[in-house]
Image: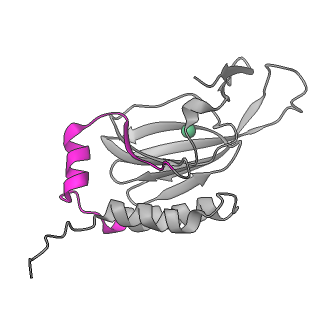
Amino acid sequence: MAVQEQKAESTLDRYIAEIRAAWRDGKDPQLPFKVQAAMEKLLASTSPDDPWMAELIREGKPSRELYRDSEHGFIQMGHVHKQGHGNTPHDHGPCWVVYGAFTGVTEITKYQRTDDGREPGKAALEKERLDRLTPGVVVPYLRGDIHSTNAVEGPGVVFRFLSYDLDRIDRSRYNVEKGTIIPVPAR
Ligand SMILES: [Fe+2]
């Protein structure tokens, strides 16, 4: 009998398989927390020397799509952020995201709106919470959560799970000082 060479399953393969098994119709409100638990396991069980992680670190790209699920539409991104890399407050429209740090420290500020939302294009934001993502820490941001990120210690290898392709949905950025909303339409 011929000996079949079996390609070893990577920690990333196992992580994706776990999410696919939990996904069903994608509407379970516990899903973001199931992905959080799966990502915590992924970060804890992956070595910097594992081939897929070593490649991500070696390439050092600010943004890379690691996996896209053609059936369910979710996407797993991998980022290598230099210290000081950050963005302005934004939401992810109807989608939810899960952020996790493998190396470095990324601070994520979560905001709450203090206005009543009645004036078009205007939003008053107040800082609600500061999450400090040290290696191994994973935090979900649910539908409509407004947040901004800042790599305070780098380079930071950051994982970002997207419940859907953000380029295909309408979302918003926010100018805190001016109290304005900047629409980010779907591409
Ligand atoms: Fe975000």
Q: Is residue 124 above or below residue 106?
A: above
Q: Position of residue 119 (x, y in %)?
A: 88, 21
In the picture, the quarter occupied by the C terminus is top right
Q: Residue at x 68, y 37 (%)?
A: 93
Q: Is residue 125 left or right of residue 150?
A: right
Considering every residue shown, the one lying at the far left of the view is: 2
Instruction: Kindly identify the residue that appears in the image at 86 percent across and 30 percent down.
Output: 117
Q: 51 above or below 114? A: below
Occupied quadrant, residue 165: top right
**Quick check: 45 above or below 114?**
below
Which span is picked out in magenta? 43-70
Across and down, in percent, residue 184 comes to 63, 23
Residue placed most toward the observer, 28 or 97: 28
Image coordinates for residue 48, horizontal then vertical, percent? 22, 57
**What is the x, y in percent for residue 67?**
40, 48
Q: Quadrant of ligand 1?
A: top right
Colour setup of the view? one colour
Instruction: Residue 56: say if magenta.
Output: yes
Q: Magenta includes 185?
A: no
Judged left or right of residue 116, residue 3 is: left
**Residue 132 falls left or right of residue 145:** left
Nearer to the camera, 171 or 21: 21
Please tell me which residue is depicted at 19% across the width and 42% down the height of the picture: 58
